[in-house]
Image (cartoon, rainbow, N blue to C red):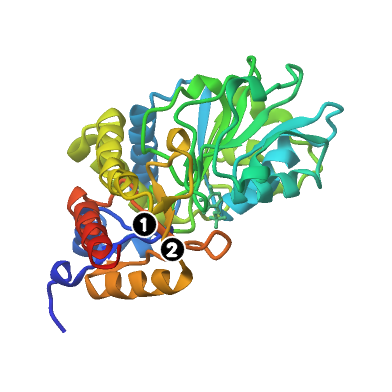
């Protein structure tokens, strides 16, 4: 087996867990046996050790800098993925409410979120993209939000359909609760518009097993005392994300990814620009050959993170995937509910990887179109 993994790495278009920056992987490799100044591995030290608390605080500081998070927001590191947030959000913010929370449904994840919310309190579907198979976002005049609603829930990027809000929708001043799992840290956000932002890390920010929550401090007290401890945001904030043993390794890796974004990429505006550039490479080919590649999402709703498209039939999909894999282009199969092809091109996917896919697509079309 070769000692250099870099030359064997394929272009990985996995939707999640997904590609990580090579420099981050190398640093993990270098530090895995002994974390500098620690005498042990990150995998072996207490979550209450000074070294780990430093790591956690540094990661948080980097995140605060990247997103310009105001002081009146708390950052929490939780487990249970975004799936648990589908429940924790309504458990803490909706139970006992007489007024319905508003859910905007732009794809599969929003549907799953609202199904969990219904178990805890009243919800209203503010908009549902079902009639056009979740290929678009609501137009401004289609979204009428009850201005007394406790929150509006949205999914900033629907990972499966490849539909992404280009910016926050108008909610008439009602705070947004956002599932930002698959575009977290891909661009700057106006955090003040949100009451709560959650994101599992394994799409764009780190490994599986750690979930970031950014929550307005004045919302921390909303969960009732009767909630199981782990499910109450207030306890996690009180205990500074050490209520139970957090995913120490995941937080360490997240901190390294945040550092990479700050120091190597140059911040989220620069990252956003790069992400636009990368996505445009693929959408350009798709738009050039509409008789061969059919994009799932409408042009003004297209995701910069998950590029979803179809070819003429499933035989072509299978052949496309097989030939792509032979060209070191991996994990391009669309989600089973949508079919076709999905190229996930998160932050850590380099331009060269996207260009390689673009070249393959052009070549494939020329041979089969
Ligand atoms: C992946 C994903 C989820 C589910 O995350 P888990 O960590 O598996 O719970 C939820 N929402 C979105 C938008 C996702 O992309």
Q: Which class describes the residues within 10 Å of circle 1: few (<14), some (14-19), or many (20+)? A: some
Measuring 49% from the left and 45% from the top, which residue is drawn there?
Answer: 181
On residue 341, the disc is none
Label 2 sits on a secondary structure element that is loop
Measuring 42% from the left and 54% from the top, which residue is drawn there?
Answer: 309
Nearest to the observer: residue 77 or residue 208: 208
Choose the circle earlier in sequence order: 2 or 1.
Answer: 1
State the residue position of label 1: 292
Q: Are marks 2 and 1 in contact (CB under 8 Å)?
A: yes
Residue 26 vertical placement versus 102 (above, below): below
Query: Where, by quadrant of the figure, is residue 358 drawn?
Result: bottom left
Nearest to the observer: residue 229 or residue 355: 355
Nearest to the observer: residue 208 or residue 227: 208
Q: Is residue 368 left or right of residue 138?
A: left
- Where in the figure is residue 199, as x and y percent of width and height? 50, 44
Nearest to the observer: residue 294 or residue 202: 294
- Where in the figure is residue 203, as x and y percent of width and height? 42, 52
Q: Is residue 358 left or right of residue 314?
A: left
Placement of the N terminus among the 4 image quadrants = bottom left
Label 1 sits on a secondary structure element that is loop
Is ligand 1 closer than 8 angstroms to the Cβ of mark 2?
no
Measuring 39% from the left and 36% from the top, which residue is drawn there?
Answer: 60
State the residue position of label 2: 312
């Amino acid at each position: 087996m070769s000692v250099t993994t870099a030359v064997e790495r394929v272009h990985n278009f996995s939707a999640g867990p997904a590609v990580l920056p090579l420099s981050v992987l190398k640093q993990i490799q270098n530090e895995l046996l002994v974390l500098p100044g620690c005498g042990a591995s990150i995998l072996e030290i207490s979550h209450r050790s000074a070294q780990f608390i430093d790591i956690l605080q540094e990661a948080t500081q980097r995140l605060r800098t990247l997103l310009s998070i105001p002081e009146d927001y708390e950052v929490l590191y939780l487990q249970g993925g975004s799936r648990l947030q589908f429940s924790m959000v309504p458990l803490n913010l909706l139970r006992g409410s007489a007024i319905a929370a508003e859910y905007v449904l732009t794809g599969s994840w929003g549907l799953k979120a609202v199904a969990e919310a219904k178990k805890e309190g009243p919800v209203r579907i503010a908009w549902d993209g079902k009639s056009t198979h979740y290929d678009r976002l609501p137009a401004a005049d289609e979204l009428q939000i009850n201005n007394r609603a406790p929150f509006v829930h949205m999914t900033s990027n629907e990972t499966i359909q490849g539909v992404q809000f280009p910016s926050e929708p108008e909610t008439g001043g009602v705070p947004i609760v956002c599932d930002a799992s698959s575009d977290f840290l891909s661009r700057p956000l106006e955090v003040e518009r949100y009451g709560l932002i959650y994101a599992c890390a394994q799409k764009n920010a780190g490994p599986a097993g750690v979930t970031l929550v950014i929550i307005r401090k004045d919302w921390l007290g909303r969960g009732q005392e009767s909630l199981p401890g782990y499910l109450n945001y207030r306890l996690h904030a009180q205990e500074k994300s050490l209520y139970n043993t957090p995913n120490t390794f995941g937080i360490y890796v997240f901190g390294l990814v945040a550092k990479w974004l700050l120091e190597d990429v140059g911040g989220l505006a620069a990252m956003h620009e790069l992400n636009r550039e990368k996505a445009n490479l693929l959408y350009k080919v798709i738009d050039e050959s509409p008789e061969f590649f059919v994009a799932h999402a409408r042009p003004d709703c297209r995701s910069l993170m998950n590029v979803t498209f179809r070819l003429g039939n499933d035989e072509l999909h299978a052949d496309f995937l097989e030939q792509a894999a032979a060209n070191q282009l991996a994990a391009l199969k669309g989600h089973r509910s949508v079919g076709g092809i999905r190229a996930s091109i998160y932050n850590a996917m380099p331009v060269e990887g996207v260009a390689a896919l673009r070249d393959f697509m052009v070549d494939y079309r020329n041979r089969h179109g």
